[in-house]
């Protein structure tokens, strides 16, 4: 592993961070312990110059470390912002916040704390009571020693005068001198008395009550000083304890430079051990206070350096931790921002590689999952797109084929969307409707076919096809000066949710077919009429020939034959007239004149004609609440109804039922006439409404044709279906708009 | 505000402090057999603050530092040997005596008693006939040598917490040739 990678790994390793913080904590604890112990340490150590320098260099190192950490990170931030690295602004804000949060309070605390510390030290030294006690105590002790010295000097001077009178340098006067010295020890309360000739020892005497065991040795320097200055004092320790002996020396008058030949008296006065001890303690206490006073600046510096060191350690730790935390947040976010940019540029393979086990780690993981999912979706989308393209291509080809087929179809094909806007209208439809493409394509059906005749198409599109989704209807339209007959089949298209997605109408022009059917029907009618007319003609011709033959034979029953013949001819002519009248009525059917009709009375009136006529056949009616009234030509519809009821009753054997049901469906009035008869054969259903088609042995075949004609004139429809379980059901639909 | 503070600090560091800066007189050198004996005075080193500190009973003193250098005409002199003389004074407030100890390279070589300030100042600042170096066999009698000396006078603090050393500039003795020693 390269050194740099190993270093990066160490940096990322949380154990190092925790270890570093633990060491820092330990250092702070140790520092705190030393500070606490420092109270008990001698002032010399606290104010030690070496310690101050060590502390200062530690602080200097820490200052440099803090500056380095801050400068390095600020430089990196500046460079990142300069290079417009993604996330650098956020990182700058975060780092500035962290550093600000750690730097400002710590520095403020240091400023405030150092000021307090300084004030505390100043107050300590400026305390007048302590200063006064120390100074006065020292002065008292010094004054006591001075007074003892002065008294001792005075006594020594007196002793010198007394001893000088005894000629101490004369060896023969030694006993007198010694006796005199003993007297002086007692008189002056001295503990020791010695006589010198210059620096040469002559006599010495100890006060036996002093407790001194050995003669004190003043030392030549002391003697010389006394000879030069006429007097001298010294304070020496005796007995190895607290006892102090004040040595005072007074020299006889003479030239200071001449040491020999001059009498010198040295006296010793013991100071009480207790007084000496207390005085020494007072002096030492004062000195201790003065030592601290002269060390004040160093004490201040020592405490401030300690405080600064703690501050810097905290600052370094908080800055470091702050930067570490900022990095912990910004690095994943930067990586995420970079990844977002890469992904927005289309690199969906990019994955964020950040070691984080917190919420940011979850975010990174989720981001990577999302990216992978995006990549998968993109691939699926591309595959789908390709399939879609191919599908579209196929569809376009199929559409072209369908379009070609539609354009070449003889039937008209019209499609509308779910909103009723015309989508397609093939050439055949345009030709049938005598319209241009621009007249209808892209327009709502009511706008495309706004005139009353073409409006029938619009109504067909708007009709609800019900469950079957298909409507088949024949209708006629006056286009130009001609009536046209069409058959329209409307199919409703549904999407996979069952919602209407559009409708397709296949339009077939039946004008020529109807004409042909009518021609055929009329031919059939003419043939039937001719046949029906020819049928009575034979008996008429035979009756006429019989009457002629009887007349030629002059037969006696001529009269009877004539009467029978005339009667037969009249009856046959009457039948012919009846048939011609019926046909005439069919040919002269008037246009309907609609009016508002109350249905319950209307139906009852028709049914009353048939109730009880055929025993065992029940005649019933059911009129829904929503079909209490309707608008149609009552006379014509009643004729149609009677015609149908007549047929139904005729076809139903007892026990059976003939019923009429009236209800509304899609705004139209629907009348169902059902029976439980034998039903209609399938091959007869197609010809049911053609004129002169009849399944009855003696029917004219015009009844259902008239019914069809009446319903068509009302723009309605009629159809015959098998009734369940048996019989026939005729359904009349009359539009009500 | 910041600028004015910086100027005052700079002036204090470079000018103010050098106005009364202590110094050493040029050391008198005597080659006494195999010893290089120096004498000199320290001027301005015995300040009122120093005396007050001694009066408190604190052991206070100077360190005189000596460097024996070999003289090079066109090159930096290279150091051959070093030695230190510590002069430490302690005041006994009971006996009102100043004990002055002289330690050369950590070894006590002399002690004196001073009974007043004058004696004390002289004992601490007037250094007479101190054998700074023993001129050994490793010195080349054909080469020239010199001794540099300076005094370390302690320390003080700037801006309450920055400790700085107080020391004199280096002073140099005359150049000398060590006496030839008999093999």
Image: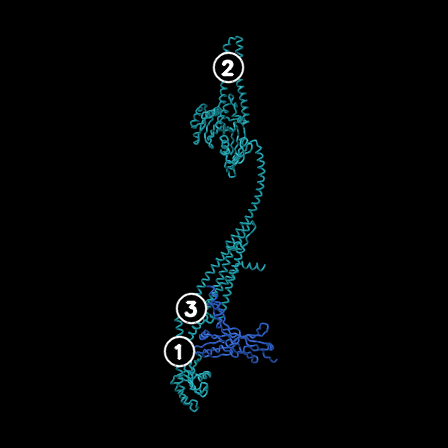
Chain colours: A cyan, B blue
- Mark 2 touching mark 1, by CB under 8 A? no
> Which subunit holds the residue at mark 2?
A
Query: Residue A569: which disc?
Result: 2
* Residue A215 placement (x, y as % from top left): 44, 84
Q: Residues within 10 Å of mark 1 (few under 14, many from 20)?
A: few
Mark 2 and mark 1 lie on one chain; the one further toward the N terminus is 1
Q: Are marks 1 and 3 on the same chain?
A: yes
Residue to which mark 3 is pinned: A122
- Mark 1 touching mark 3, by CB under 8 A? no
Disc 3 on helix, strand or loop?
Answer: helix
Query: CA–CA distance between discs 2 and 1?
Result: 192 Å
Image quadrant containing the N terminus of chain A: bottom right
Disc 2 on helix, strand or loop?
Answer: helix
Q: In terms of depth relative to the viewer, which is nearer, A572 or B93?
A: B93
Residue to which mark 1 is pinned: A143
- Mark 3 touching mark 2, by CB under 8 A? no
Q: Are marks 2 and 1 on the same chain?
A: yes
Query: CA–CA distance between discs 1 and 3?
Result: 30 Å
Task: Tell us which disc is closer to us: 1 or 3.
Answer: 3
Q: In terms of depth relative to the viewer, which is nearer, A84 or A222?
A: A84
Mark 1 and mark 3 lie on one chain; the one further toward the N terminus is 3
């Amino acid at each position: 592993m390269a050194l740099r990678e190993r270093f990066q790994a160490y940096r990322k390793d949380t154990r190092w961070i925790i270890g570093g913080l633990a060491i820092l904590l330990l250092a702070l604890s140790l520092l705190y312990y030393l500070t606490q112990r420092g109270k008990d340490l001698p002032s010399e150590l606290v104010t030690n110059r070496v310690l101050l320098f060590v502390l200062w260099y530690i602080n200097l190192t820490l200052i440099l470390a803090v500056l380095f950490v801050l400068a390095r990170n600020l430089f990196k931030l500046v460079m990142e912002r300069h290079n417009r690295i993604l996330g650098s602004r956020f990182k700058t804000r975060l780092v500035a916040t962290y550093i600000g949060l750690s730097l400002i309070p710590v520095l403020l605390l240091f400023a405030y704390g150092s000021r307090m510390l300084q004030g505390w030290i100043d107050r300590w030294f400026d305390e007048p009571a302590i200063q006064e006690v120390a100074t006065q105590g020292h002065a008292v002790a010094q004054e006591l020693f001075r007074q003892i010295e002065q008294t001792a000097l005075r006594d020594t001077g007196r002793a010198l005068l007394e001893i000088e009178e005894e000629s101490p340098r004369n060896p023969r006067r030694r006993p007198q001198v010694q006796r005199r010295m003993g007297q002086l020890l007692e008189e002056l309360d001295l503990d020791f008395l010695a006589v010198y000739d210059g620096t040469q020892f002559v006599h010495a005497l100890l006060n036996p009550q002093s407790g001194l065991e050995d003669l004190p040795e003043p030392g030549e320097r002391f003697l010389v000083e006394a000879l030069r200055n006429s007097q001298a004092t010294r304070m020496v320790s005796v007995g190895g304890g607290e006892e102090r002996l004040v040595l005072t020396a007074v020299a006889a008058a003479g030239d200071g430079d001449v040491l020999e030949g001059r009498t010198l008296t040295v006296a010793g006065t013991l100071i009480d051990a207790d007084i000496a001890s207390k005085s020494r303690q007072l002096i030492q206490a004062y000195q201790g206070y003065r030592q601290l006073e002269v060390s004040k600046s160093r004490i201040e510096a020592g405490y401030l350096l300690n405080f600064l060191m703690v501050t810097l350690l905290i600052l370094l730790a908080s800055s470091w931790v702050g930067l570490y935390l900022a990095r912990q947040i910004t690095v994943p976010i930067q990586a995420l921002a970079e990844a977002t940019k890469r992904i927005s540029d289309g690199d969906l393979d990019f994955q964020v590689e950040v070691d984080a086990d917190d919420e940011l780690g979850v975010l990174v993981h989720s981001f990577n999952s999302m990216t992978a999912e995006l990549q998968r979706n993109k691939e699926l989308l591309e595959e789908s797109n390709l399939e879609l393209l191919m599908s579209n291509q196929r569809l376009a080809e199929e559409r072209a084929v369908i379009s070609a087929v539609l354009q070449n179809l003889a039937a008209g094909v019209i499609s509308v969307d779910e909103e009723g806007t015309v989508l397609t209208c093939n050439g055949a439809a345009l030709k049938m409707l005598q319209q241009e493409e621009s007249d209808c394509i892209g327009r709502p059906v009511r706008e495309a076919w706004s005139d009353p005749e073409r409006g029938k198409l619009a109504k067909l599109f708007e009709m609800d096809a019900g469950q079957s989704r298909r409507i088949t209807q024949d209708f006629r339209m006056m286009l130009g000066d001609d009536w046209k007959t069409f058959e329209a089949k409307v199919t409703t298209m549904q999407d996979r949710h069952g919602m209407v997605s559009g409708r397709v109408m296949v339009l077939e022009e039946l004008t020529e077919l109807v004409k042909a059917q009518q021609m055929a029907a009329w031919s059939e009618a003419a043939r039937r009429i001719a046949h029906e007319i020819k049928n009575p003609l034979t008996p008429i011709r035979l009756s006429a020939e019989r009457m002629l033959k009887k007349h030629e034979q002059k037969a006696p029953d001529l009269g009877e034959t004539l009467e029978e013949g005339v009667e037969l001819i009249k009856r046959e002519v009457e039948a012919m007239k009846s048939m011609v009248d019926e046909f005439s009525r069919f040919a002269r059917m008037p246009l309907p004149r609609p009016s508002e009709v109350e249905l319950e009375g209307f139906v009852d009136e028709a049914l009353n004609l048939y109730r009880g006529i055929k025993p065992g056949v029940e005649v019933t009616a059911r009129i829904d609440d929503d079909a209490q009234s309707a608008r149609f030509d009552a006379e014509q519809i009643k004729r149609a109804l009677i015609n149908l009821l007549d047929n139904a009753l005729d076809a139903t054997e007892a026990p059976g039922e003939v019923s009429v049901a009236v209800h509304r469906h899609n705004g139209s009035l629907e009348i169902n006439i059902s029976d439980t008869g034998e039903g209609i054969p399938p091959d007869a259903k197609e010809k049911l409404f053609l004129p002169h088609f009849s399944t009855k042995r003696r029917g004219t075949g015009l009844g259902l044709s008239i019914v069809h004609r009446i319903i068509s004139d009302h723009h309605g429809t009629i159809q015959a279906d098998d009734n369940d379980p048996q019989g026939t059901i005729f359904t009349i639909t009359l539009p009500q708009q | 505000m910041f600028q004015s503070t910086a100027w005052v600090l700079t002036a204090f560091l470079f000018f103010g402090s050098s106005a009364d800066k202590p110094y050493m007189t040029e050391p008198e050198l005597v080659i006494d057999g195999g010893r290089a004996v120096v004498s000199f005075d320290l001027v301005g080193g015995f300040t009122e603050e120093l005396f007050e500190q001694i009066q408190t009973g604190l052991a206070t003193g100077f360190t005189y530092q000596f460097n024996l250098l070999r003289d090079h005409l066109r090159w930096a002199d290279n150091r051959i040997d070093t030695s230190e003389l510590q002069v430490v004074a302690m005041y006994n407030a009971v006996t009102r005596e100043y004990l002055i100890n002289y330690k050369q390279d950590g070894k006590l070589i002399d002690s004196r008693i001073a009974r007043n300030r004058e004696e004390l100042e002289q004992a601490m600042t007037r250094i007479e006939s101190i054998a700074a170096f023993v001129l050994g066999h490793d010195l080349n009698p054909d080469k020239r040598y010199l001794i540099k000396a300076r005094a370390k006078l302690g320390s003080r603090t700037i801006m309450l917490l920055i400790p700085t050393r107080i020391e004199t500039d280096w002073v140099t003795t005359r150049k000398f040739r060590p006496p030839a020693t008999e093999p």
